[in-house]
Image (spheres, helix red, strand yellow):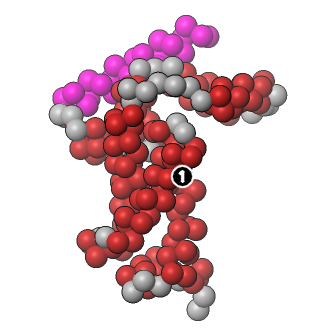
């Protein structure tokens, strides 16, 4: 049986014995999703890639602490999100906007104008509008709406109380709704 046909439990057992081919197979299965998760938080492709790779290294060295192999994807995603938020908090005082972000934003807006699919246009408009919200609103909505975390998980990730989390997400949704209505 080749590594690509093995289930995650078998691959993780091989990873625990430092099988580099198994580690590469696990990496290949998860790296795109983990990169995208990190990128949505740190908003820098190079840093997101570094965080994603560091998260994989951390996960491979701490595999023994994983209780259920079937939960590896969500466990790895939590590591990536925690590392991304940690980086974000350390560097949030620096608000430089890289030229690449400006170029991508222009390209994205041009791509929307040529898109015939109404749903894609609406989703793109919502995501673009989310980017104009306050940072804590962006992060809470990203974790809740895009990443699919519930309130308890967001409380733990953002280190806030349950009441503050519910209020933050409610206010973020209201702010997003108002901005979308004002653009309509």
Tell me the chief SS of the magenta region: helix
Q: Quadrant of the C terminus?
A: top right
- Indicate left or right for 20 with 88 as reference: right
* In the depicted structure, whether residue 115 falls above or below residue 9: above
* In the depicted structure, whether residue 124 falls above or below residue 4: above
Q: Residue at x 28, y 43 (%)?
A: 157
Tell me where residue 102 sits by quadrant. top right
Q: Is residue 124 visible?
A: no
Instruction: Give the camera-side residue of 77 and 43.
Output: 43
Q: Is 93 within the magenta?
A: no
What is the x, y in percent for residue 38?
A: 48, 46
Q: Residue at x 37, y 82 (%)?
A: 16
- Indicate left or right for 87 with 50 as reference: left
Q: Which residues are magenta?
A: 163-184
Q: Is residue 153 visible?
A: yes
Q: Residue at x 34, y 19 (%)?
A: 171
Tell me where residue 9 sits by quadrant. bottom left
What is the x, y in percent for residue 112?
A: 74, 28
Total numbered labels: 1
* In the depicted structure, whether residue 97 falls above or below residue 151: above
Instruction: Give the camera-side residue of 15 and 73.
Output: 15
Instruction: Give the camera-side residue of 30 and 114.
Output: 30
Q: Quadrant of the N terminus?
A: bottom right
Instruction: Give the camera-side residue of 164 and 134.
Output: 134
Residue tagged 1: 49
Q: Residue furthest top?
A: 182
What is the x, y in percent for residue 36?
A: 54, 48
Q: Is 171 within the magenta?
A: yes
Q: Residue furthest right?
A: 114
Q: Residue at x 38, y 42 (%)?
A: 87
Secondary structure under the numbered disc 1 in the rendered image: helix
């Amino acid at each position: 049986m080749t590594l690509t046909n093995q289930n995650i439990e078998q691959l993780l057992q091989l990873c625990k014995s430092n099988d580099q081919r198994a580690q590469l197979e696990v990496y290949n299965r998860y790296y795109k999703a983990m990169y995208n998760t990190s990128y949505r938080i740190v908003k820098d492709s190079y840093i997101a890639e570094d965080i994603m790779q560091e998260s994989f290294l951390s996960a491979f060295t701490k595999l023994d602490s994983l209780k259920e192999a079937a939960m590896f994807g969500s466990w790895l995603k939590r590591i990536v999100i925690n590392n991304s938020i940690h980086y974000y908090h350390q560097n949030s005082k620096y608000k430089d906007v890289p030229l690449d972000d400006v170029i991508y934003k222009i390209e994205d807006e041009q791509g929307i104008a040529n898109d015939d699919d109404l749903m894609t246009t609406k989703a793109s408009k919502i995501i673009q509008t989310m980017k104009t919200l306050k940072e804590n609103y962006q992060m809470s909505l990203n974790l809740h709406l895009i990443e699919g975390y519930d309130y308890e998980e967001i409380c733990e990730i953002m280190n806030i109380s349950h009441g503050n989390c519910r209020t933050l997400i409610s206010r973020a949704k209201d702010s997003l709704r108002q901005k979308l209505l004002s653009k309509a």
